[in-house]
C-alpha cells in the first residue's frame, strides 16, 4: 500500500530513497483521501519508477495480485470508506449447526488446533466482542493465549447489565474490558464494574451500528465478534459484519433447542440467504474452517477520490482552503494537531531531569498527579506511565483531579505543545502552514479544550495552537527574512 506521509513526516518515503530502491510497485493507493497520491508523487519527483497495480500495470495476473492487496488491507479500506471498524464474526459449530448443547454447554466444539488458530485471530484484532448471555453462560476469558504479542481489548454488549459480579472478564490484570450498555441501566452495577477498573459506556439505544461507530471514533481498526446467535443476528442485520469465520467440527449434538450461530434475520425464503464472497476452505486438525466476506470490499476508486480529483470535480470542495481548520482524530487531515498524535516529548521533571512522555496527552494527564502528596495520586501517576494509549491515559486522568488544576492546566498544556512542535520540524512547518485559518478542535464532548458540537465549546486547544503558531512565525521572521515565511505570514 502507498505509505501515508503522516502530516509531513516523510520517513517512509525517505527510507525508500535512502535504501537505493529504484522501482516501487504499489498494490493500492492510500485509502485516506488526504494521504492518497502524496507518496506516489513524492517518489516520482525523486526519479523513482512507480507503478500502480490496476493503473500502470494491468493483466489477469496483476488483477489477482491487486485483489490480494485489497484483501490484506480490508480493515483499512472498511474504516476509510464506511467509518466503522472491520468486523469479523467467528463461531464454532457442530456438523448439525449447533454452537452449544441445549443445556448451553459449549466446551469444546472445535479442536485444540482450531482454538489455537482462534488465539492468533484474536491477536490480529483490536477488540473481541461478546453479548451478555455469553458472559453469563461461558464466563469466557477472551485472551490471546499464545505466548506474548498483542492482547485485544474485550467488549461486552449488555442491555440489562444483569451480569455476574465475579467474572473472568472483570480481571483486568492482563487486559482491559469495556462494557457497553443502555443509558441508565443498573447504576449500582455500573459502580461495581468501575471499582474493578472496567470502563462502562452508555448508549441511548444500544445497537451494533452505534457501538461500532463509537469504536471507530476511538481508533479501532478491526473487531472480532465471538458472541452467540442473538447478538450475531443483530450485528448482521445492522450491516456491520464484513467477514465470517465458521469452524465446523465433525460432531453431531442434536437438540431442538440447542442454539445455532445466527439467530433470526427475518428471512423466510432461501432465495434471500446471504451469499459469502471470496470463500476459502481450510482444514484445521479435524475441523473445517470456512471463511468469506459478507459484503464486497468497497471499490476505492469512485468512493475515495484523491485531493486533486475532488478539486477537479468540484473546486469548491477543498477542506484545505477553508478559513477554519477543524482537527480531532489523529488520522484525519491535520490529525497531528491532536494531543493523541504519537509524538513523544521530553520534558524536565521537578529535579531538572529529562523525562520522555509518549505523547502530549500522557504528559498533560500525568500532571493532574505529579507532585501530589497522596498515595492514590501516586498510584494514578504510575498507571499513567504504563498506559499504552492516550485514551487510557485520559481515562486514568478522570479518576482524580488536584484542587489547583484549573489554575495550572493551561500552562501545563502550553508547555507540552511548545515542546512537541519544537521537537518535530515537520509538525512546526505544518502548524505554520495553517496561518490565516482558525484552528478548532472538533471535539463534541470537551467544551473546554474543544469547540463542541455546535461551536459552544471554548476551544482552548485551538487557541493555544494559534498562539504557538504566532510565536513560531514571529521567531522565524525575526531570525531570517525567508520569502516563504513572508508568504505564510501574509
Ligand atoms: N460455539 C461458539 O462459537 C459460541 C457459542 N456460544 C454459546 O452461545 C450461547 C449464548 O448465545 P446467545 O444467547 O445468543 O448470546 P449472545 O452472546 O448473543 O448474547 C446475547 C445478549 O447480548 C446482549 N445484547 C446487547 N445488545 C444487543 C442487541 N442489539 N441485540 C442482541 N443482543 C444484544 C443482550 O445481553 P443482556 O441480556 O445482558 O442485555 C443479549 O441477551 C451460550 O450457550 C454460549 O456457550 C457463544 C459464543 C460463541
Ligand atoms: N465453544 C467454542 C468457542 N466459544 C467461544 O470462545 C469463548 C471462550 O473463550 P476463552 O474463555 O478465552 O477460552 C466463548 O465464550 C465463546 O465466545 N470458541 C471456539 O473457538 N471453539 C469452541 O468450541
Image (cartoon, rainbow, N blue to C red):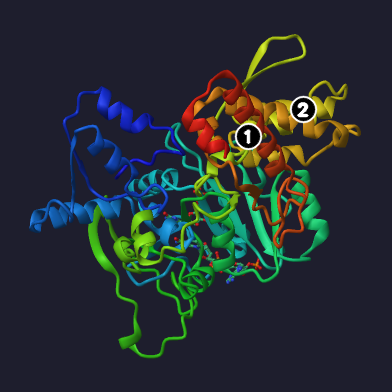
The residue sitting at the right extreme is 403
Residue underneath mark 2: 379
Q: Which mark is residue 480?
A: none
Instruction: Relative to 271, say whether 426 is above or below.
Output: above
Location of residue 400 by image quarter: top right
- Can you tell which quarter of the image residue 354 is in? top right
- Residue 277 coordinates in the image, percent (x, y): 27, 68
Q: Out of 207 and 482, give the one closest to the viewer.
A: 482
In the rendered structure, the answer to whether residue 291 lies left or right of residue 464 reads left
Contact, CB < 8 Å: mark 2 with mark 1? no
The x, y position of residue 192, in whole percent, is 79, 50
**Residue position for label 1:** 469
On screen, residue 430 versus residue 403, left or right, reads: left
Residue 456 in the image, given as x and y percentages of width and height: 77, 58
Quarter in which the N terminus is drawn: top left
Seen from the viewer's position, the closer of residues 344 and 425 is 425
Please tell me whether mark 2 sits on a helix, a strand or a loop.
helix
Q: CA distance from mark 2 to mark 1?
A: 36 Å
Q: Against 189, is 378 above or below? A: above
Residue 223 drawn at (x, y percent): 47, 54
Residue lying at 38% horizontally and 32% vertically, measured from the top left: 10
Left or right position of 72 against 223:
left
Mark 1 secondary-structure assignment: helix
Amino acid at each position: 500500500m502507498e505509505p501515508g506521509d503522516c502530516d509531513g513526516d516523510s520517513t517512509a518515503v525517505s527510507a525508500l530513497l535512502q535504501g537505493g530502491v529504484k522501482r516501487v510497485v504499489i498494490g493500492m493507493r492510500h485509502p485516506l483521501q488526504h494521504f492518497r497520491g502524496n507518496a506516489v508523487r513524492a517518489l516520482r519527483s525523486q526519479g523513482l519508477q512507480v507503478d500502480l497495480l490496476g493503473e500502470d500495470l494491468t493483466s489477469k495476473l496483476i488483477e489477482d495480485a491487486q485483489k490480494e492487496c485489497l484483501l490484506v488491507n480490508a480493515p483499512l479500506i472498511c474504516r476509510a470508506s464506511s467509518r466503522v471498524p472491520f468486523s469479523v464474526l467467528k463461531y464454532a459449530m457442530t456438523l448439525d449447526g449447533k454452537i452449544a448443547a441445549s443445556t448451553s454447554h459449549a466446551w469444546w466444539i472445535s479442536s485444540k488446533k482450531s482454538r489455537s488458530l482462534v488465539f492468533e485471530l484474536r491477536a490480529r484484532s483490536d477488540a473481541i466482542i461478546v453479548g451478555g448471555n455469553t458472559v453469563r453462560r461461558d464466563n469466557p476469558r477472551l485472551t490471546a493465549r499464545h505466548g506474548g504479542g498483542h492482547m485485544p481489548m474485550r467488549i461486552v454488549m449488555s442491555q440489562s447489565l444483569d451480569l455476574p459480579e465475579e467474572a473472568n472478564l472483570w480481571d483486568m490484570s492482563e487486559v482491559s474490558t469495556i462494557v457497553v450498555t443502555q443509558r441508565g441501566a443498573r447504576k449500582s452495577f455500573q459502580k461495581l464494574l468501575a471499582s474493578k477498573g472496567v470502563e462502562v459506556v452508555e448508549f441511548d439505544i444500544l445497537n451494533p451500528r452505534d457501538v461500532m461507530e463509537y469504536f471507530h471514533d476511538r481508533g479501532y481498526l478491526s473487531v472480532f465478534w465471538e458472541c452467540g446467535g442473538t447478538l450475531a443476528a443483530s450485528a448482521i442485520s445492522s450491516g456491520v459484519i464484513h467477514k465470517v469465520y465458521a469452524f465446523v467440527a465433525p460432531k453431531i449434538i442434536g437438540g431442538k433447542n440447542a442454539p445455532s450461530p445466527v439467530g433470526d434475520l427475518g428471512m423466510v425464503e432461501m432465495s434471500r440467504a446471504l451469499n459469502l464472497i471470496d470463500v476459502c476452505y481450510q482444514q484445521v486438525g479435524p475441523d473445517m474452517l470456512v471463511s468469506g466476506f459478507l459484503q464486497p470490499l468497497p471499490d476505492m476508486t469512485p468512493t475515495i477520490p484523491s485531493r486533486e480529483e475532488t478539486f477537479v470535480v468540484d473546486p469548491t470542495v477543498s477542506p484545505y482552503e477553508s478559513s477554519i481548520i477543524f482537527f480531532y482524530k489523529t488520522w484525519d487531515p491535520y490529525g497531528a494537531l491532536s494531543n493523541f498524535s504519537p509524538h513523544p516529548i521530553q520534558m524536565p521533571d521537578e529535579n531538572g531531569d529529562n523525562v520522555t512522555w509518549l505523547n502530549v496527552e500522557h504528559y498533560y494527564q500525568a500532571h493532574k498527579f505529579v507532585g501530589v502528596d497522596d498515595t492514590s495520586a501516586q498510584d494514578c501517576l504510575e498507571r499513567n506511565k504504563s498506559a499504552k494509549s492516550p485514551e487510557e491515559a485520559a481515562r486514568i486522568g478522570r479518576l482524580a483531579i488536584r484542587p489547583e488544576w484549573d489554575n495550572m492546566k493551561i500552562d501545563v498544556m502550553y508547555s507540552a505543545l511548545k515542546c512537541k512542535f519544537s521537537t518535530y520540524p515537520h509538525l512546526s512547518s505544518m502548524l505554520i502552514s495553517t496561518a490565516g485559518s482558525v484552528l478548532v478542535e472538533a471535539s463534541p464532548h470537551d467544551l473546554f479544550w474543544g469547540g463542541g458540537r455546535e461551536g459552544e465549546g471554548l476551544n482552548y486547544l485551538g487557541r493555544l495552537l494559534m498562539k504557538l503558531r504566532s510565536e513560531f512565525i514571529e521567531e522565524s521572521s525575526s531570525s531570517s527574512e525567508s520569502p516563504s515565511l513572508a508568504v505564510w505570514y501574509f
